[in-house]
Image: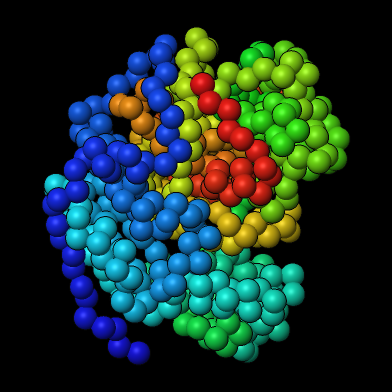
């Protein structure tokens, strides 16, 4: 199928004040934030991203990443704060309200509309059809005795079809790779395309690995702290929330303590933080609420290197949706803060090592702006993902770290053995991070984010 000609929309009219009023989920400035100003160039990128995200929010009617499938014809929106540009993928002609938004952009912002072969809604339908045909997430391909393990299924960013990730068990790898890696890609794409009814691009993507394992937090509890989970390992605390019953909880990853009961303590000292609330957890969102005896939260996130011990933390001022192209920061108990991490894809379905399908996660990778090319380190599971705002003196919540992608060689600064779980071992560095969007978690769990 041939694509229609590309349309480009450029305008410079909408006043900045009008645009600022459209920024969702941001509450007024808080006094007392510890200053950590970004460089001038980084601050400009942050400002551009906030403007572009606000425009994207208007186009998507404030809907979260996966729910945008409700918009007829919509495929994806991609922001590019480096070039102050927005790209919209749409099947058919965008409606009048979208054309009006693109025709009245702030000065310096450009945008374009690219034709998509499928809408997000069509690709969601195709994904469900494919998943219903995959027993235990295994796909049978022509000419092989062993099925291929499907590791992810996502709408392609450009709306051209589904992007299906696969991994091979040892026997499958030997049988398939004999014919060459390119042949494997073709076989997987053909088989998945037949089952889903849409165009499929196959990629070799290792199965996501749950990250487990600042060190001695105290009440009021702060996010991105080091927790000893009920299994005895190390994980990261995330955001403070209030549930529908009015209880205050600290959140972490479900896979860190999947049992219905369990004690969570500080990593150093072993002080009790709280206990698992069996009614406040979701395997699909990979989140668990920790019931706090103190009922006290700071509404802040620890910042800086994991080794920092002066208690430096920044306030969480609200939350926002994620867009392809956004820059975000990851924040974990073992890896500290890594910024310059860029969203490559949203609305991905990923199967975790625990066999639980996580239907709505986003994926971000370290860039040249990320020191050492590291997006996270082992032990960062459950930690927050945020966007820096107000010249990086405050944080906007974006999600919770659930798994990893692309192991990389740790830079020298990380190559000092650390003691974890009573054993000395070197850190494990990652270039990519999967995380569950905070908007989905709050909606599914009926939680309210606690701000600082």
Q: Is 435 located above or below residue 7 in the figure?
A: above
Residue pictured at 68% horizontal, 60% vertical = 357
Q: Nearer the viewer, residue 123 or 169?
A: 123
Please identify the quadrant where the N terminus is shown: bottom left
Residue 198 in sight in this render: yes
State the residue at coordinates (63%, 89%): 143
Q: Residue at x 30, y 88 (%)?
A: 2
Residue 137, percent from left and from top: 69, 70
Q: Is residue 318 left or right of residue 249?
A: left
Is residue 396 at least partly visible in the picture? no
Tell me if 121 is positioned left or right of 393 in this view: right
Q: Which of 64 and 275 is in front in this view?
A: 64
Q: Is residue 275 left or right of residue 334?
A: right
Instruction: State which quadrant residue 388 falls in.
Output: top left
Q: How many marks?
A: 0
Tell me where residue 158 sits by quadrant.
bottom left
Vertical relation: 113 (above or below) 305: below
Whole-percent x and y of residue 397?
49, 36
- Percent across and percent down for residue 225 are 60, 24
The residue at the far right in this view is 261
Residue at image x 45%, y 38%?
Answer: 25
Q: Position of residue 430 (x, y in %)?
A: 49, 44
């Amino acid at each position: 199928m041939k694509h229609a000609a590309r349309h480009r929309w450029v305008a410079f009219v909408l006043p900045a004040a009008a645009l600022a009023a459209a920024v969702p989920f941001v509450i007024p400035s808080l006094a007392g934030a510890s200053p950590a100003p970004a460089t001038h160039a980084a601050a400009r990128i942050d400002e551009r991203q906030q403007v572009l995200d606000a425009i994207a929010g208007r186009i998507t009617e404030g809907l979260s990443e996966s729910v945008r499938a409700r918009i007829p014809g919509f495929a994806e929106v991609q922001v590019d704060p480096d070039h102050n540009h927005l790209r919209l993928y749409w099947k058919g002609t965008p409606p009048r309200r979208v054309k009006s938004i693109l025709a009245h952009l702030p000065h310096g912002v450009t945008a374009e509309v690219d034709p998509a072969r499928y809408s997000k809604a069509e690709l969601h339908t195709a994904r469900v059809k494919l998943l219903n045909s995959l027993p235990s997430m295994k796909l049978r391909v022509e000419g092989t005795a062993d099925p291929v393990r499907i590791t992810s299924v996502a709408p392609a960013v450009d709306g051209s079809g589904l992007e299906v990730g696969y991994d091979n068990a040892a026997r499958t790898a030997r049988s398939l790779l004999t014919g060459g890696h390119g042949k494997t890609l073709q076989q997987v794409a053909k088989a998945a395309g037949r089952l889903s009814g849409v165009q499929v691009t196959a990629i070799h993507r290792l199965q996501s690995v749950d990250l487990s394992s600042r060190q001695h937090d105290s009440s009021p509890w702060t996010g991105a702290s080091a927790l000893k989970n009920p299994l005895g390992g190390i994980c990261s605390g995330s955001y403070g929330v209030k549930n529908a019953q009015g209880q205050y909880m600290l959140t972490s990853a479900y896979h860190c303590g999947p049992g219905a009961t369990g004690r969570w303590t500080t990593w150093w000292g072993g002080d009790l933080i709280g206990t698992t609330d069996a009614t406040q957890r979701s395997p699909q969102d990979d989140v668990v609420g920790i019931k706090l005896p103190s009922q006290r939260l700071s509404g802040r996130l620890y910042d800086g290197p994991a080794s920092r011990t002066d208690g430096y933390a920044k306030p969480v001022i609200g939350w926002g949706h994620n867009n392809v192209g956004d820059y975000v920061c990851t924040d974990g108990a073992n890896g500290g803060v890594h910024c310059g991490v860029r969203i490559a894809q949203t609305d991905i379905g990923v199967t975790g090592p625990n066999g639980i399908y996580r239907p709505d996660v986003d994926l971000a990778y370290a860039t040249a702006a990320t020191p050492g090319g590291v997006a996270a380190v082992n032990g960062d599971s459950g930690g927050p993902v945020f966007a820096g705002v107000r010249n990086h003196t405050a944080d906007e919540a974006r999600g919770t770290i659930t798994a990893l992608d692309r192991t990389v060689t740790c830079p020298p600064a990380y190559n000092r053995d650390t003691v974890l779980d009573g054993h000395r071992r070197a850190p494990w560095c990652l270039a990519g991070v999967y995380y569950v969007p905070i908007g989905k978690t709050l909606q599914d769990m009926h939680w309210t984010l606690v701000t600082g």
